[in-house]
Every structure is written in C-alpha cells, then in structure tokens.
Image (cartoon, rainbow, N blue to C red):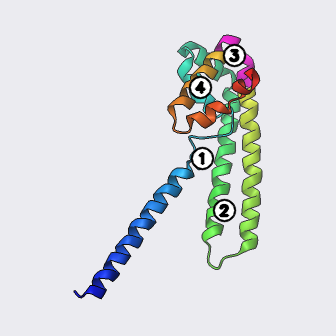
C-alpha cells in the first residue's frame, strides 16, 4: 500500500469515527424525545398509583373505573390502527401526500379523543384520592424525577415547585 492509499484509508476512518461521535452526541442531546420524559404532569401517575397505595385501595379505585378502562382500551386500539394506517401511507409507493395528510389528520383526531378520555379517567381517580394519597403520589413522582437522567429539568419545572416559589 502506497502513502496515498494509506492517507485515504486514514481519512475515511477519521470521517467514520467523527460521524459516530456526532451521532452519539446528537442522540444524547435529544433525549427529551424519550418517552421517559414528558411535559404531561400526569405522566406515570397510574404506575405510581399502583406502586404507592395499598393493594386493597388500588383494587377499590380500579373497580370504580372498570367501565371507563374498557372504553380506554377501545380508544387506544383505534389509535394503534390510525397509526398503522399512517405508517402504511408514509411508506406507500407511489407516495401520495394527500393520503398521508388524511391519515395524519385522522391520527391527530383519534389521539385527541384518546387523550381526552384518559384525562377524564385520571380526573375520576384523582377525585377519589384522599389528600394524603395525592401527596404520597406526588412525593413518589418527585423521587422518580430525581432518579431519571432528565430529573433536574423535570423537578425544576414541577407544578408544586412553581406554586412554592
């Protein structure tokens, strides 16, 4: 191998390493898109509810919203179907922007309906919680926020922190 070929191989290797490093940095900086981070203040509360309250209390709360939970399953099934149609339209050949626009609009509509129902069920649960149970859930959520990599952002922007300041 002559010097010129050696320089070309070194240059290609350098470009490859730089691209890997840039991809890693971009991936780390865009972790806010990670599902573990959410601007939704109720994100993760159902999980916290199950983990922080006694089993008999959780059973009581869940039985009070059984019908609503069935309805939620229906909404999320529709959401998965709308998402599937969107993916199909996105990769379809020949590509049709009008079909993608329709499926995108449909997905947005179904998403909003599912979110409204999720919020309604959450509010039904919140209404049944005692003040102590609500505080227990928020304290547990703070603990979760501190454990995550984006904990400082989540905790600093928490609604209870803003209220205190």
> Secondary structure of the magenta portion, mostly?
helix
Spatial separation of the CA atoms under disc 4 and disc 2: 36 Å
What crowding class fits label 4: few (fewer than 14 Cα within 10 Å), some (14-19), or many (20 or more)?
some
> Label 4 belongs to which residue?
142
71 relative to 130, above or below = below
Spatial separation of the CA atoms under disc 4 and disc 3: 18 Å
> Label 3 belongs to which residue?
129
Of badges 3 and 2, nearer the viewer stands 3
The reply to whether discs 3 and 2 touch (Cβ–Cβ < 8 Å) is: no
- Magenta residues span 124-133
> Label 2 belongs to which residue?
86
Residue 138 drawn at (x, y percent)? 64, 22
Residue 72 drawn at (x, y percent)? 68, 38
Q: Which of marks 1 and 2 is nearer the N terminus?
A: 1
Q: Which of marks 3 and 2 is nearer the N terminus?
A: 2
Q: Residue at x 75, y 37 (%)?
A: 117
């Amino acid at each position: 191998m002559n010097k010129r070929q050696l320089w070309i191989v070194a240059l290609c290797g350098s470009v490859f390493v730089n691209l890997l490093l840039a991809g890693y940095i971009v991936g780390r900086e865009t972790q806010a898109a990670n599902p573990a981070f959410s601007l939704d203040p109720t994100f993760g509360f159902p999980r916290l509810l199950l983990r922080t309250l006694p089993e008999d209390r959780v059973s009581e709360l869940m039985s009070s919203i059984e019908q609503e939970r069935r309805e939620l399953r229906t909404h999320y099934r529709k959401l998965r179907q709308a998402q599937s149609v969107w993916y199909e339209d996105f990769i379809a050949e020949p590509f049709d922007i009008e079909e993608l626009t329709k499926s995108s609009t449909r997905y947005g509509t179904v998403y909003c309906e599912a979110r409204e129902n999720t919020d309604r069920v959450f509010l039904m649960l919140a209404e049944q919680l005692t003040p102590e149970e609500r505080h227990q859930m928020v304290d547990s959520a703070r603990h979760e926020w501190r454990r995550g990599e984006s904990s400082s952002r989540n905790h600093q922007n928490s609604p209870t922190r803003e209220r205190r300041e």
